[in-house]
Each structure stands twice: as structure tokens, then as C-alpha cells.
Image: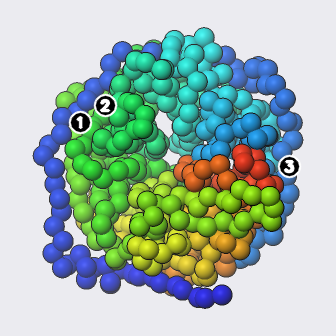
Amino acid sequence: MKAHLQHFVTAIVCTILLSGLAAAQESPLRPIIIRGGQHGVSPAVRDIVVPNASADAQSSISPMLQSTSGLNFDGIAAGSENGQPVPNVNGAVGATQYVQTQDTQGGQWAVFDKTTGNMTFGPISSIKIWKGFAAPCGNTVSSQTLVNYDKAAGRWIMARHAYPTTGVNYICIAVSQTSDATGKWNLYGYPFSTTFPDYPKLGVWTDAYYMSFNMLTASSPHTFISPMVCAFDRNGMIAGSATPANPVCFQPTTTLTTLLPADLDGSVPPPAGSPNYLLNLDANALDIWKFHVDFTTPANSTLTGPTKFAAPAFTKACSKQAGICISQLASPAPPPVPSALKAWSDRLMNRLAYRNFGTYESMVVSHAVSFSATSASSFIRWYEIRSPGTTPLVFQGGTWHPDDISRWMMSMAMDKVGNIAVGYSESSPSIFPGIAYTAHLATDPKGTLETPENVIMQGAGNQVYNNNWGSYTSMSVDPVDDCTFWYTNQYYTEQGSKIWNTRIASFKFPSCH
């Protein structure tokens, strides 16, 4: 196998920053206030009858190189070729549970015991939590279901997009009343837009829950209009207020997609008064935005940016193939030949994981790159960004491609001692798509991923239905020990057009305890 490793550190980036790259600033934006919100409380979801529920996920322990083994078990599965092709699996870890969501069949979710890996609730449609709630959150099948865990409050947050066949799209948000995801939830629904809020991402911050969207035209085929970012009243939702503050949104006039909101890890909050940071991918650069919300006087809310800061030059993966070029192993027989898969290289990948170490602030994030515009391979480009509140810079990072296998669909996080883990999908003409991870330990040389690759699950089939391969994968950090990483992604257990499965794995590094 070929060995290709490339990294960069502060000194290189500082040289680029000093070359005079100017910050691009937009004119001040006016906040958009969303009014007419709906409120309700769910029944205890543990009392919902789940048809064909499994009481036990397939759980096993897998040895992981240079890390302490954890759980490695199957999550929600399609179950048959009558399923849909792309689960867009997402997940988060809480005090005692792991909650996983997926995007098909109107959006499903399930709850797993964090100690055993057993499925204790679900899988069930996400609309069930909204049963009896006002339309359209209460009666419209939806997709793009996200889950997160508010570590400071000990609450789960679930968000979904409800889109009736005509009329206004709604954003539906549920906040659990306790740290038990199978209890009651405070429910909220917000009339959003007649245009289509696609690719939502969710970040927990101290003053609000922040969501970003790519706004598309209402009619199919959808085309991109602009990004949009919104702040939702965290305190009001946690309290179960019937009248929380109205959400505050901004819609920048830019052609750049996916403003990824910072998502808080660890027990140390951001400095007092810190805005939420949002990042997007630019040409050989990153852009940072700062969202300050004022729910008392919404007109005082601001979204400032973009401020551009340099990254070493990169080429987006599959850029000459409309973003689609990742090869899969062809099944022996019968056909069809597998599709090339989408690299999603036009955007930063979930999550923008933020951590305050007290003496400095740090964020980690990644995206897919390649050697050239015509290359049919994808590699991992990753960054650790520091000083987001003052002069942001890439403190360290690199491009990781240890062999000719394509790696993409990444998610990153950092534990309390500074170890960085990145999980991802991998595929090539010689292997079916699988799931793996690697890491940068706090003691490793800057800009390197020194940990040998750890395979979480090797797939046993390829995707032939279409070229999408998820886009909501997630790496999260256990709020109890602040050391254990939890990662979820998708794979195929056998050859079939839509017989995907999902996997959940946990691991930690000996230096974190």
C-alpha cells in the first residue's frame, strides 16, 4: 500500500495568515423573528407500543488498537429491500443512554442502554413523540431527524423538519423533561418557510440551541438559495414554557453552503457572553461567523461575518465528477454494478465540536479532499481551530490518506485531555463500504493522525440504489467521564439494494481517565 501523509502546524498557517488574506464582511443583516410557535407535552414515550421492537441489539466487544475497547453493536436497520436507501444516521450519548436517529420511513429513533448496548426502546417513527400535537408536526411524516444531548442541563434535544405537501414547512423541536429519553418531552413547532430547509445541523450552546439549514427552492428538483441559521430559546424549552421566546434567524446572502454551528463539549462553558461560532468551507480557507442572540430585544441580535482565515490549499474530493466518485467493491454476481458514492466534499462535516480548556478555546472539524480535481479518491482533511473569539487560526491539522482506500463521511470530537478522534466511512474497488476511526493523541506530533486505523465494521455489501451515502454521521463524547467517544455510521450486512444497517461503537484512550 502506498503511504501518503501530509500535515501542517501553526507556523505554516501563521505564514499564510500574514500574507494579507482579507476578511470578507457582509453588510449588517436584519434578524428574522419566527412567530406563531406551538407548544405541547408528549406522553411518556416508554408507554408507546412499539411494533416488532427488539429488546436486544446485537452487541459485541471488538479489540481496538491503541484504545480501550468499548461496545460495538448494531443500531437501527432497514430490515428489508422495501426500506429506503439512505439512513442519514445520527446519534448522541447521554448520562445512561445512547439515542440514535435515522432518516427513512419518516424518520426513526431508538434508545440503547449505554452499559450493555441493548435496545431499550424503539425503533419507532419520530412522529410518534408528536402524537396529538398540532399540525403539521403532529400529523406530517418528516425526515432529517437530529438528536443531541445538552450536557449541562441533562436533557435530550430532538429536531425534525415537517413538510406538508402544500404550505409552510415547520421545524419541530422536542426537549426531554429529564435525562431519560423514554420519559416526557416538551414539544415545540415553528412555522418556518415555504422554501425547503434542507441539511439541518444542531448545536448546543449556553444561551440557545442553534440550527443551520441550506435553504432550497420549494419545488423539486430543489436548487440552493442560501444558508440560514436560527437560535431557539434553550432556557424556555428546558423549563417547558408554553411561550418561550420567539426563534431568531438570519439568512445571509451568500452562495457558500452549510454554516455549521459550534456544539459544546465538556463541563467548562464558553467565556461569558460568547456568541455561537459557525464555520463554512471556502476556497483554500475557512469562514467563521458569530451569532449573538438577544431573546429579550431580538432586534439587538447579530450575525457577523464571514471572516475568512486561511487553510493550506486543498482540492475538494470528486470535484470534477459532480462530487460523486468513490468506488465500491462490485458484488460477485448478479449485477447491478454499484454506483459511485457521493463525497459530500462541498461542505464541512458534522460536528463542529467546541471545547473550552480554560486557557484557550478549541474547535475540531473535517472535510473531504483529494489529490486533484479529476481524482477518484477521497481523503480526510482535519483541523483544530483555536482563538475563535479573537483571531481564529488553524492551530494544527492535516490530510490523512495512508493508502489508496477512500475515506469520507467524517465526524470529529475531542476528549477532556485533548485527544482527537475521527470516525468515517471507507470504500474502494477492493472493499465494500465499512466504518473505521483513527486519532490524534494529545502526545502525538502536531498535525498527525498517529493512531493506526481501527475498523469498527467491515461491510459485506455495496449500495446500488443511488449515490448518496448518508450525511449525518456523528462522533460524540460521553458526558459522564468526558473521555469515551461514541460513533455511529452505516454499512451493509449483505448484498441488496436497500438492506443497510447501522453501527454504534464506543472507545477511549488510556491517557484520559
| Residue in view at x 81 percent, y 70 percent | 63
Q: Of the residues tagged 2 and 3, which is closer to the observer? A: 3
Gap between marks 1 and 2 measured at Cα: 8 Å
Q: Decide if residue 83 is on the left or right side of residue 27.
A: right
Q: Quadrant of residue 29?
A: top left
Labelled pair 1, 2 in contact (Cβ < 8 Å): yes
The crowding category of the residue bearing disc 1, from other C-alpha atoms within 10 Å (few below 14, some 14 to 19, many at least 20), is many
Q: Decide if residue 370 is on the left or right side of residue 61.
A: left
Dot 3 falls on a residue whose secondary structure is loop
Gap between marks 2 and 3 measured at Cα: 43 Å
Identify the amino acid type marked 3: Gln
Relative depth, front residue between 135 and 338: 338
Relative depth, front residue between 273 and 189: 189
Please provide percent x and percent y for residue 75: 75, 46
Up/down of 105 relative to 431, above or below: above
Q: Decide if residue 317 is on the left or right side of residue 430.
A: left
The crowding category of the residue bearing disc 2, from other C-alpha atoms within 10 Å (few below 14, some 14 to 19, many at least 20), is many
| Residue in view at x 43 percent, y 59 percent | 322
Q: Point out the tag, 1 or 2, that comes first from the N-terminus.
A: 2
Up/down of 482 relative to 188, above or below: below
Q: Of the residues tagged 1 and 3, which is closer to the observer? A: 3
Q: Which residue is mark 3?
A: 58
Q: Which residue is mark 1?
A: 301
- Point out the residue furthest to the front here: 335
| Residue in view at x 14 percent, y 43 percent | 28
Q: Which residue is mark 2?
A: 248
Dot 2 falls on a residue whose secondary structure is strand
Residue 410 seen in render: no
